[in-house]
Structures are given as C-alpha cells and as structure tokens.
Image: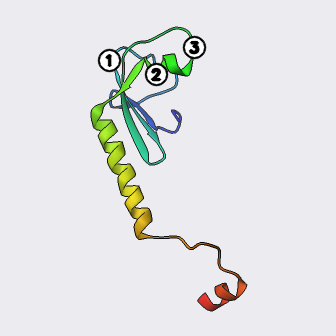
C-alpha cells in the first residue's frame, strides 16, 4: 500500500520508514475509498487491533465523504442491474 503511493503523510507521499508524530494527518487510499485519519498517540510496541484503533481518529469530513461515495455506488448498482445468470451458448450467438 505504501510502496504504491497510496499513503500520504501531511500531504506528501510517504515511504514505509517514515516516523509518525502525534497530530499528523494521514490519507489512505484503498480501492475506491479514501480515509483521512489523525494520529492521536504513538506506541513502540505492537498492540491488538482494538488498542490500535485508539491511536488514531478518522476526520469527520472523511467519514461524510466515504458515506457519500458508498451511497453513490449503491445508486449506480440500482440503475445498472446485472442479469441473473450468464448467457448460454445460443444467447451469446444471438448477441453477435
């Protein structure tokens, strides 16, 4: 993820060895979603996922933006329905 340029630290592309600081802003891009989080605390040891979630907080603007994008994807699926099954050999021949 980091090597692909999908992580930005305070607005700049970062490398895996970047040392993070408290109150830094990190933008993460995963597929169609983009999250902006603020670092609240830093620890030297690896912790459980529930404890790690306490170390950062997603910004309100990021949450609203992700919800809007999810709603747009849902609406897009509704306007372009998919067929129930794949076309068989005869149906494929007719479509050509």
Q: Residue furthest front?
A: 84
Which of the two marks, 3 or 2, is nearer to us in this view? 2
Q: How far apart are the two marked residues, 1 and 3, measured between alpha carbons? A: 20 Å
| Vertical relation: 71 (above or below) 26 | below
Residue highlighted by disc 2: 53
Which of the two marks, 2 or 1, is nearer to us in this view? 2
Asked which secondary structure carries label 1, the reply is loop
Residue 74 as seen in the image, left or right of residue 17:
left
Residue 91 as seen in the image, left or right of residue 79:
right
Residue 88 as seen in the image, left or right of residue 9:
right
| Vertical relation: 66 (above or below) 15 | below
Q: How many residues crowd mark 1 within 10 Å: few (<14), some (14–19), many (20+)? A: some
Q: Residue at x 63, y 73 (%)?
A: 85
Badge 1 or badge 3: first in the primary sequence = 1
Residue 13, percent from left and from top: 41, 32
State if disc 2 and disc 3 touch (CB < 8 Å).
no
Figure label count = 3
Badge 2 or badge 1: first in the primary sequence = 1
Q: Residue at x 32, y 49 (%)?
A: 68
User: In the picture, which quadrant includes the C terminus?
Assistant: bottom right
Residue highlighted by disc 1: 23
Residue highlighted by disc 3: 46
Residue 6, percent from left and from top: 46, 38
Asked which secondary structure carries label 3, the reply is loop
């Amino acid at each position: 993820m980091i090597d692909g340029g999908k992580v930005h630290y305070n607005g700049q592309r970062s490398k895996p060895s970047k040392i993070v600081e408290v109150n830094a802003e990190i933008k993460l891009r995963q597929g169609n979603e983009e999250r902006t989080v603020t670092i609240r605390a830093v620890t030297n040891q690896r912790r459980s996922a529930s404890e790690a979630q306490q170390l950062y907080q997603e910004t309100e603007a990021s949450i609203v933006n992700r919800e809007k994008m999810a709603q747009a994807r849902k609406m897009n699926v509704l306007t372009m329905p998919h067929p129930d099954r794949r076309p068989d050999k005869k149906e494929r021949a007719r479509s050509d």
